[in-house]
Image (cartoon, rainbow, N blue to C red):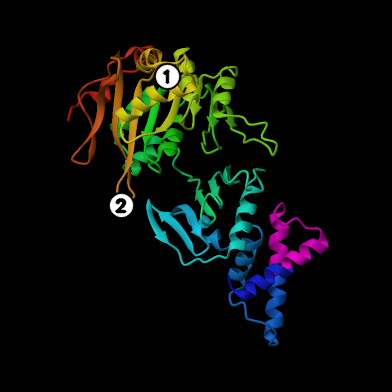
């Protein structure tokens, strides 16, 4: 940041304190004060006092970014092509554009990194200290923040996954070639038919984006309950209850876990339960909910669709010694209808790699599946296998063979 902008930022901050202006809460007042102080500073430099500001419009934007935005990182927050921002240390600031990482020219000192993190955490009320060296939080625009601090890390590690607007429909994903038009229509039918969908993939493959797009297919009258570690989903439902976990307080009490939220959601009369991600014992409570007739969708980290099912058959065992595979495997086979596997290539392109349907059959070790869509020569095509369990589609008045008729 230029010294002139830093000087004007200090003057604006001092004036705000004198006049009792809350710069963060009153953006109109912040913009007015910043413009006035930039103009005054510019007038003083004309008589030879201080470093010139140059472009006053850019200087005002820099001052506002320093005082009410995210300082040197603000241009990357404003850049729609930037998907993710992370700091490995004061001089190692990276961004990802279209899935590809690049090192930025931004350099920060330790104080600036700490100030940025404090500013990001302030709206959420979440804390970060030696006793709590990790934090997950949502920024006001819906972006997700994760921070880890020493001694767990060598330097402050900050990661912001930006909230991306405009990708709230399957048709938008078809336009990006994430999936084919036939696969999108099949998934639309599946959601409207009330099937239970597991969205699987590695980190940053677009699982949450696809989950939002699937939720956009829900009927207007459905009551939707979402459960997440930190608010990240952006489901535009008319009847929506969104819940997130809560970390323990300074005394170590008051924590609300994902498993507790899944249990509480069942008392809220959901037509559709959406879990941001299953990664622990809450998977058992999700299966119990699905087994009771509640339609659901969730994401899971896995390298393939079959690995996702294996993982979903294993995670519930973490719930206690009285839970065994004899209950979990048949429950997964009976409850889960579809697995949608996502991937990302070295160019940053996100793609649906395959869609598996669960047949309902199983053995002691695995759940039986058939491929419904798979990639052939880079294209997502119907396999020709057909949907093994059609009763939900038939009850909703849909015939998926319309889009599944052509084989590879």
Secondary element at tag 2? loop
Q: Earlier in the sequence, mark 1 or mark 2?
A: 1
Q: Nearer the viewer, mark 1 or mark 2?
A: 2
Which of the 4 image quadrants contains residue 251?
Answer: top right
Q: Position of residue 338 (x, y in %)?
A: 34, 24
Q: Is residue 377 above or below residue 389?
A: below
- State which region is magenta: 12-36
> x and y percent of residue 312 in the render?
39, 25
**What residue is shown with label 2?**
347
Number of marks in picture: 2
Q: Position of residue 72 (x, y in %)?
A: 56, 63
Residue 65 image position (x, y, % from top left) = 61, 61
Q: Are the residues flagged by discs 1 and 2 in contact, CB closer than 8 Å?
A: no
Q: Quadrant of the N terminus?
A: bottom right
Look at mark 1 in the image and give the residue it sits on: 194
* 145 or 37, nearer to the observer: 145
- Check the image and report above or below for 116 versus 177: below
Locate the C terminus by quadrant: top left
The answer to whether one can see residue 217 in this image is no
């Amino acid at each position: 940041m230029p010294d002139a902008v830093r000087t004007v930022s200090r003057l604006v901050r001092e004036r705000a304190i004198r006049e009792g202006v809350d710069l963060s809460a009153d953006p109109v007042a912040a913009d007015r004060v910043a413009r006035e102080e930039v103009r005054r500073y510019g007038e003083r430099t004309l008589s030879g006092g201080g470093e010139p500001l140059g472009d006053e419009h850019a200087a005002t934007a820099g001052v506002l970014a320093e005082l009410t935005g995210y300082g040197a990182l603000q241009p990357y927050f404003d850049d729609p092509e930037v998907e993710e921002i992370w700091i490995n240390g004061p001089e190692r600031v990276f961004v990802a554009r279209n899935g590809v990482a690049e090192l930025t020219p931004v350099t920060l000192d330790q104080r600036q990194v700490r100030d940025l993190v404090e500013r990001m955490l302030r709206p959420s009320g979440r804390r970060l200290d030696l006793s709590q060296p990790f934090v997950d939080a949502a920024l006001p625009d819906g972006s997700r923040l994760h921070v880890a601090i020493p001694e767990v890390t060598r330097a402050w590690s900050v990661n912001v996954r930006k909230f991306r607007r405009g990708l709230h429909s399957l048709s938008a994903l078809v336009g990006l070639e994430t999936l084919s038009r036939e696969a999108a229509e099949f998934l639309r039918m599946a959601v409207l038919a009330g099937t239970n969908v597991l969205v699987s993939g590695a980190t940053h493959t677009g699982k949450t984006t696809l989950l939002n797009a699937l939720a956009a297919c829900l009927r207007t009258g459905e009551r939707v309950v979402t459960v997440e570690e930190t608010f990240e989903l952006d489901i535009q439902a008319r009847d929506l209850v969104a819940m997130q976990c809560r970390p323990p307080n300074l005394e170590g009490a008051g924590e609300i876990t994902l498993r507790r939220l899944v249990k509480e959601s069942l008392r809220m009369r959901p037509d559709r339960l959406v879990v941001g991600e299953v990664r622990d014992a809450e998977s058992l409570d999700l299966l119990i909910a699905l087994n009771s007739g509640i339609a659901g969708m969730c994401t899971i980290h896995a390298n393939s669709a079959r690995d996702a099912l294996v993982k979903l058959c294993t995670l519930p065992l973490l719930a206690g010694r009285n839970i065994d595979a004899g209950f979990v495997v048949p429950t997964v086979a009976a409850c889960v209808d579809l697995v949608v596997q996502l991937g990302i290539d070295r160019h940053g392109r996100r793609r649906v790699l395959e869609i598996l349907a669960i047949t309902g059959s199983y053995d002691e070790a695995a759940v039986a599946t058939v491929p419904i869509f798979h990639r052939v020569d880079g294209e997502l095509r119907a396999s020709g296998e057909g949907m093994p369990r059609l009763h939900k589609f038939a009850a909703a008045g849909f015939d998926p063979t319309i889009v599944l008729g052509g084989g590879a």
